[in-house]
Amino acid sequence: MQNEWIYIGLFLVVGALIPAAAIIVSAVLSPRKSNQIKESTYECGVETVGENWVQFKAQYYIFALVFLVFDVEVVFLFPWAVALNQLGVFVVVEGLIFIGILLAGLIYAWRKGMLEWV
């Protein structure tokens, strides 16, 4: 019984050591020569003119977040929709409740104005 857990523990240790080793090697071997040109801000290879501070509208972030949530939910609904004719009544009702919850979230976001692209 304990031999099975050794493999899991070994997997976790190796899984933590490989990324840690990559980060350490990168920190040790990376060049550290910094100059003004490397530190300058640019966009698409063109030097910026004026103030470098750009105010980002939080509305775009919320719009992307709502899109991501509903996009991931479609991934969960796809297998359910494919196997719909093989499922029992209970599973179909659960799926419809899930869709109802998503629809309520969409209506909430819509009424709050989160889907307005202004």
Image: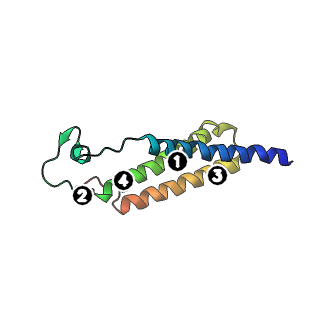
Measure how far apart labels 3 and 2 are at the Cα level. 46 Å
The residue where tag 3 is placed is: 93
The three-letter amino acid code for the residue at tag 2 is Gln
Looking at the image, tell me whether mark 4 or mark 2 is earlier in sequence order: 2
Which SS class for mark 2? loop
Measure how far apart labels 3 and 4 are at the Cα level. 30 Å
The three-letter amino acid code for the residue at tag 3 is Val
Would residue 48 appear left or right of 1 to someone viewing this image?
left
Where is residue 20 drawn, in percent x and y?
A: 55, 46
The residue where tag 2 is placed is: 55
Which SS class for mark 3? helix
Looking at the image, tell me whether mark 1 or mark 4 is earlier in sequence order: 4
Looking at the image, tell me whether mark 2 or mark 1 is earlier in sequence order: 2
Would residue 45 appear left or right of 78 to someone viewing this image?
left
Looking at the image, tell me whether mark 3 or mark 1 is earlier in sequence order: 1
Label 4 environment density (alpha carbons within 10 Å; few <14, some 14–19, many ≥20): some
The residue where tag 4 is placed is: 63
The three-letter amino acid code for the residue at tag 4 is Phe
Measure how far apart labels 2 and 1 are at the Cα level. 31 Å
Q: How is the image coloured?
A: rainbow
The residue where tag 1 is placed is: 73
